[in-house]
Image: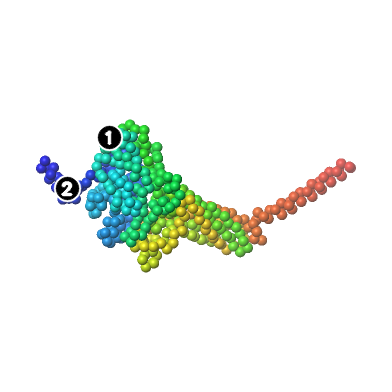
Amino acid sequence: MWAQIIVILVLGAQGGPTHNFESAASCAKCHSSIHAEWRNTMHAQSYSEPIFQMVFHQVASEADRRSCLVCHAPLAQRTGDFTLDDPITREGVTCDVCHTVSNLPEVGSPGSLVLSPGKTKRGPFAAEELTEKGHKNEYSPAHLKSEFCGACHEVVNKHGFHVMSTFTEWAEGPYPHSGTQCQNCHMPDDVRFPIVDSDVVASIKTATSHGFMGGHSLIQVEKAAEIALVAEKTKKSIEAIVYVTNKESGHKLPTGIPTRQLVLTVRLLDEDRRRVLEEKTADFRRVVADATGREIDADDPAGMLLNATQVLRDNRPSPKETVRESFSFKAPEPPRTLHVEAVLEYHLKPDVPGRGPTHIEMARAQFPLEVEAGGSLLKSAWIPLAVLGAAWALVYLFRRAGGASRAGSD
């Protein structure tokens, strides 16, 4: 008994664990497939991810640093481990962060999450649907609602400004009316992952995906938008119109911290599509400013999170919205066959030193312009050429027919 007391005192003096939260490694013993998917996600890397680390170390105020950890290392606030000495704190949004939540949190207030650690785990399955082995299960309807995600994915800074407004963008769009929650897109049903390893419990139930694919997912980003391109030649210019549609995203595109943006590049190409004659761009982003009205640069996420108070511009397409962008190019001399190309890219900023910029191509379209020296479309020149060719063919046939009749009379 005394030995146990001494061990507890020593662990407490050394800052050892004094809580009931379990490490993800403990969960992996029975849920290996789910754990293997989770450990490669932004939730698992919410504290260790290079961009966060770079921004976190730029924050001087201890109070501001702690506010960062509320979402990026949520257990720190619950255990008091703000120095992140306990390895479980550095696990970021680890299993017990979500599966011990016992309330529906307030949107934009991650501190309102009530975590009740212990041997009862909470999720979207009723206890009677699962075999309780290793821990008890409790059904939580909160885990099926977007408000659950909105605690962290709606960031309100100390000025009351919504630096990240992902939940609001979803709530104001068409998806809530169809009953589509965040989980439907970011945690879809996945038959590859059994709810528990078969050698632990024989169960036919499968889990929802724990990949949490979003703005860092190549697959998710590539299917989020589509573009359509049309172009025509006038006497002095080439006019191009690009339609950009937020096809798959349940919020504005892009969402999250305002450092992210879409960049639409439209190029006028020569005949073989290798040489760029002229290039123009347009961006889609949320531009924010501090209390003085000064725009906060996209390479300053710390400044955005801490100092933003107002929106200067926001032209991001909303869910299912199509926006129109026009571009004008000078017609080259001499006129010749040309091509117009449009490319939509997702830019994730700031750039991480040593890793370079993150640019993901989302959509691409091309439009051919065949022009003749007179400046009209080349294909229109085929009409008189075709008529002339038909006339010569008729003359040839009549002459041949006349020659044949004369030969017959001889």
Work out whether 307 lies above or below 243: below
Task: Pick the residue in front: 227 or 174.
Answer: 174
For the N terminus, the quadrant is top left
* In this picture, residue 256 sits left or right of residue 240: left
Q: Which residue is drawn at 44% across and 62% down?
A: 313
User: Residue 259 location in percent, x, y?
Assistant: 39, 58
Asked if residue 8 can be seen in this view, the reply is yes
Q: Residue at x 41, y 51 (%)?
A: 171
Q: What residue type is labelled 1?
A: Lys
Residue labelled with disc 1:
133
Task: Tell which residue pokes out farthest to the bottom in this image.
Answer: 292
Task: Pick the residue in front: 248 or 136.
Answer: 136
Asked if residue 334 can be seen in this view, the reply is no
User: Residue 236 location in percent, x, y?
Assistant: 61, 64
Callout 2 secondary element = helix
User: Residue 158 location in percent, x, y?
Assistant: 31, 60
Q: How crowded is mark 1: few (under 14 residues within 10 Å), some or many (20 or more)?
A: few
Which of the two discs, 2 and 1, labels the residue nearer the N terminus? 2
Q: Residue at x 42, y 45 (%)?
A: 180
Residue labelled with disc 2:
11
